[in-house]
Amino acid sequence: MRLIHTSDWHLGQTLHGQDRDHEHAQFLDWLLDQLVARQADALLIAGDVFDTVNPPLKAQERLYDFIVRAHERLPQLDIVMIAGNHDSGGRIELPAPLMKRLNAHAVGRIGWIADGQLDHDRLLLPLHDASGKVAAWCLALPFLRPAEVTGGEAGDDYLAGIRQVHERLIAAAEAVRQPGQALVALSHAHMAGGAVSEDSERNIVIGNAEALPASLFPEAIAYAALGHLHKPQQVAGQSRIRYSGSPLPLSFAEVNYPHQVLLVEFEGEQLKGVESLPVPRAVEMLRIGRAPLAEVIAALEALPPTGLFDDNLPWLEVRVLLDEPLPDLRPRIEAALAGKAARLVRIASEYAGRRGESESQVLLGLDQIAPQELFARAWEEQFGNPPDDQALDDFTTLLQRVEFASEESDA
């Protein structure tokens, strides 16, 4: 059996206010061609399908149009997608009855039945091979919010609640599978040791721990298809536990990532191999600087001119080192860009440090500073000393609760 693992589409995302629908459309066209060419039996989408809990109508149309076209070209294809921390679980599941007619399954939330038993039937989905036989079972684990997993035996321990869900779902899967059928986990989470981008992934905090252990996916799991981190990577050095990464760079910090989807093949219940399928970039992303203004202007003037039939010009970020604010900075940059083949979407000004400051202490824009760093700076300014670990943990927990509450109110 073959499947394609992908995640973090972030449909509806804008790049500093610029629409990216063309890029998403090109990716989905390419992905559909790959599903056909590789004769895939299943497509697993590991969360953050949309960029926000209330995605624009065009983004929703993109998703459902893709599912319809995939079913038309590959009627036997199984599609499973889960909600990520950017998604609304309710919205993802809303069209589920219609999607089932297209062999597509959406799991946005877990559920519990009488006596605190996990409703595992809706989280265990069969994956079929080309002959129509069940070749594997998909354990669908959407992003787990505290309200879904705490209480009961786990108490208020978020990590213990997550572990309990994993253990119960794996036990249920082992009870239902037949010899020769693989177990494939589909999860949206931050695993320990995972490399994050500078400014794209929203921090997920598990109590006082920053990430989940790889032990949540024991050897019984032939493959764990992960979402959340945009950089492709294995977890704990295990080729069977992987982030596919995002198919598009979602910020300029991700320009050099190897954007891909993964072709995963099984032989019976064992993982046979994983192949990276690089995603073509529909729109290039250029980053000029960090450099003094004179060097930046020279680099801009060296860009190629706009051609008569140029379309979808590259996105451009300019990073300028300044000694002091320049009121006419944007006009000077725009003048240098006149007639050039690029679309300016961001100017980042960074100011040289005051006397005695190191290069790492230069002033940055607010959009370049994490909330935890802002809190630490404000604390030190107020009290004269850096915050201790307990203060940082308390702030991070509060930040998490606010983000979760905001997502739920928007859902």
Image: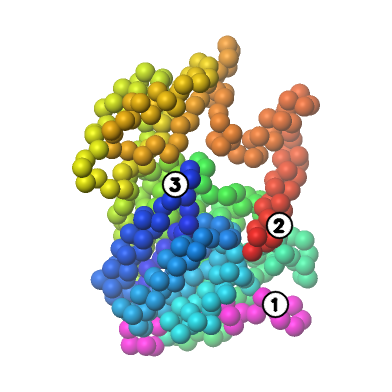
> In the image, what residue type sits under mark 2?
Ala
The residue range painted magenta reads 111-133
In front of the other: label 2 or label 3? 3
Which label number is shown at residue 112? 1
Residue 18's mark? Answer: 3
Q: Which residue is mark 2?
A: 405
The image quadrant of residue 386 is top right
Q: Residue at x 53, y 78 (%)?
A: 96
Residue 128 visible in the shown view: yes
Q: Earlier in the sequence, mark 1 or mark 2?
A: 1
Which amino acid type is shown beneath numbered disc 1?
A: Trp
> Given the image, on which type of amino acid does mark 3 rest?
Gln
Q: Quadrant of the C terminus?
A: bottom right
Within the magenta stretch, is there residue 393?
no
Q: Nearer the viewer, residue 212 or 140?
A: 140
Q: Secondary structure at mark 3?
A: strand
Residue 306, given in percent of the width and then of the height, sits at 25, 38
User: Dots 2 and 3: beta carbons under 8 Å?
Assistant: no
- The answer to which of marks 1 and 3 sits earlier in the sequence is 3
Residue 406: mark = none
Q: Where's the N terminus, which quadrant?
A: bottom left
Q: Outermost residue, left direction?
A: 308
218 is higher (above) or lower (below) than 353: below
